[in-house]
Amino acid sequence: MLVLGTTDVDHDGDVNAEPRISKEEAHYLMEGVNHVLPGLNLDLSHCISSMAGIRPVLSRGKSLAASKESREHVVWQDKGLVTVTGGKLTTFRLLAHDALKAAKPFLPARTTSSAVPEAHPPLNRISSLRVPGRTVERILGRYGPKAGSMILDQEESLLAPIETTPDIWAEIRHAAEHEDIHHLPDLMLRRVRIGLLLPDGGAGLLDRVESLCSPFLSWDKARWEKEKKDYAGLWQACYSPPEPPKEP
């Protein structure tokens, strides 16, 4: 799977609305990839999904284009409210460190535990389920040793990949139980992101998602149907690929 990006243009729309990529940006990205990989003849019909975001940047006050502004970041603290602006993907770790440093005086003191941390999931359990090594490595890298054990020590049917994605079904249930899901897009687009990795946002899997998550989410059947409908509408409006150009 290939991710194309990025673009850097001014956002003139409503900052409270979900952003989406424009057709002009999509065509620009396709033009770029075909310049680098001309033999593949890629077009928008090959795209599975799209995503866009709004990033505040630090302005020098000279009305420069977004791509010309500073990529430095700054952190403000005002009576416990920590605000971050600027930064870029390659400096996210430093930005997060600075934000946590600013928030630390307002957080509860960290307590030390005498318990020995769990180093890895039960290896005999994992090996008996024949989980691929790359899956174990990804789960431990993403969730850490303890959470990895909580996910990997599940029944074998939940350790299977979700379609063609690297995610496994146990992650869906783990997210519903532990990761504060308020709406279906929280799960599909932000916790496991299978909505960005599968055609139609994984709409064909939502019934199984419901069956796995229902024990942990206090949604009745009507709420589930509304969540599915709203998710499908949001995905189509903001995360689907822009329509490929029509043939002349």
Image (tube, rainbow, N blue to C red):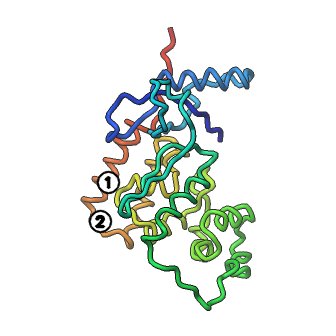
Q: Is residue 88 left or right of residue 225?
A: right
Marks 2 and 1, the one that precedes in the sequence = 2
Q: Residue furthest top?
A: 248
| Vertical position of residue 87 compared to residue 160: above or below | above
Q: Tell me the crowding category of disc 1: few under 14, some 14 to 19, or many 20 or more residues within 10 angstroms, Cα based.
A: some
Q: Amino acid at mark 2?
A: Trp
Left or right: 170 with respect to 34? left
- Is 159 placed above or below 63 here? below
Regarding mark 1 in the picture, which secondary structure is present there?
Answer: helix
For label 1, the residue is 227
Is 152 displayed left or right of 204 in the figure? right
Residue at 34%, 51% in the rendered image: 228
Q: Classify mark 2: residues with Cα within 10 Å, few (<14), some (14-19) or many (20+).
A: some
x 46%, y 50%: residue: 84
Quick check: marks 2 and 1 in contact, CB under 8 Å?
yes
Q: Which residue is mark 2?
A: 219
Q: Residue at x 52, y 56 (%)?
A: 192
Q: CA distance from mark 2 to mark 1?
A: 9 Å
For this rendering, which residue is in front, 242 or 79? Answer: 79
